[in-house]
Image (tube, grey):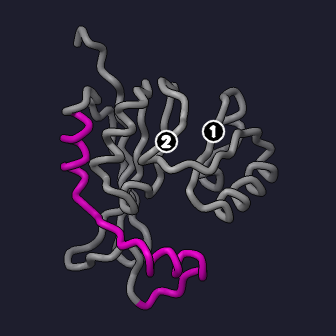
Amino acid sequence: MFDLLDPALFRPFRITCTDLNRSFLARLEERLVRCGLNATVLEDDIEHTELESEPDLLVATLLLEHIDWRRGVEVFAGLRPATCGIIIQENPEGMTTAVTIGRRIPPSIAKAVEIAHSTLDPHDKLLAAFEERGYKCRTTYAQEVDDGKRLIAVLFLRQNSRS
């Protein structure tokens, strides 16, 4: 994300970044320094998170493919962010794995792929699950990426109890 957006957009905010993998976090910390950003970086399991509730914005990038996505939606809704941005991967017809078979990938990702088997569900199921928990889809954006895949970004807004 920091490669695609001007880091100045993030400077006015208190940022917390999490991952289960400490080596991924170390690389993230290096990126944050290069971008001139200050953030709290935590090792955290989103399915059993210790994040503070009611953030202004929660962003999950390519996370739901690697956990029980329904549990992820429950956790996100339980944190009660005002806005929730989710980026998921959509595969071309017939491709069932998150990582393209035969693609050369870094050793850390190859190891993770051996252990965790990703699940990819259509984003219409994601929209319905968030709606059931009081979040309305504000906008959706799709970007074509390698191997015929698409990244789908969805922005959800928490609805007031009056709406």
Residue 97 on the magenta span:
no
Q: Amino acid at mark 2?
A: Thr
The location of residue 5, given as percent across then percent down, is 61, 47
Q: Amino acid at mark 1?
A: Thr
Asked if residue 19 is positioned above or below residue 90 in the image, the reply reads above
Q: In 3D space, how far apart are the residues under numbered discs 2 and 1 (Cα atoms)?
A: 13 Å
Crowding at mark 1 (Cα within 10 Å: few <14, some 14-19, many 20+): some
The location of residue 157, given as percent across then percent down, is 35, 27
* Dot label at residue 16: 1
Residue furthest top in the image: 162
- Residue at 43% across / 24% down in the picture? 82
* Dot label at residue 49: 2
Q: Earlier in the sequence, mark 2 or mark 1?
A: 1
Crowding at mark 2 (Cα within 10 Å: few <14, some 14-19, many 20+): few
The location of residue 109, given as percent across then percent down, is 54, 75
- If the image is split into quadrants, where does the C terminus sit? top left
* Dot label at residue 2: none
Residue 105 on the magenta span:
yes
- Residue at 27% across / 30% down in the picture? 136
Task: Please state the extent of the stretch shown in magenta in the rendering.
Answer: 102-131
Q: Are marks 2 and 1 in contact (CB under 8 Å)?
A: no
- Residue at 47% across / 52% down in the picture? 61
Q: Is residue 8 left or right of residue 129?
A: right
Q: Secondary structure at mark 1?
A: strand
- Residue at 43% across / 68% down in the picture? 145
Res 132 quadrant in image? top left
Res 162 quadrant in image? top left
Q: Secondary structure at mark 2?
A: loop
Front disc: 2 or 1: 2
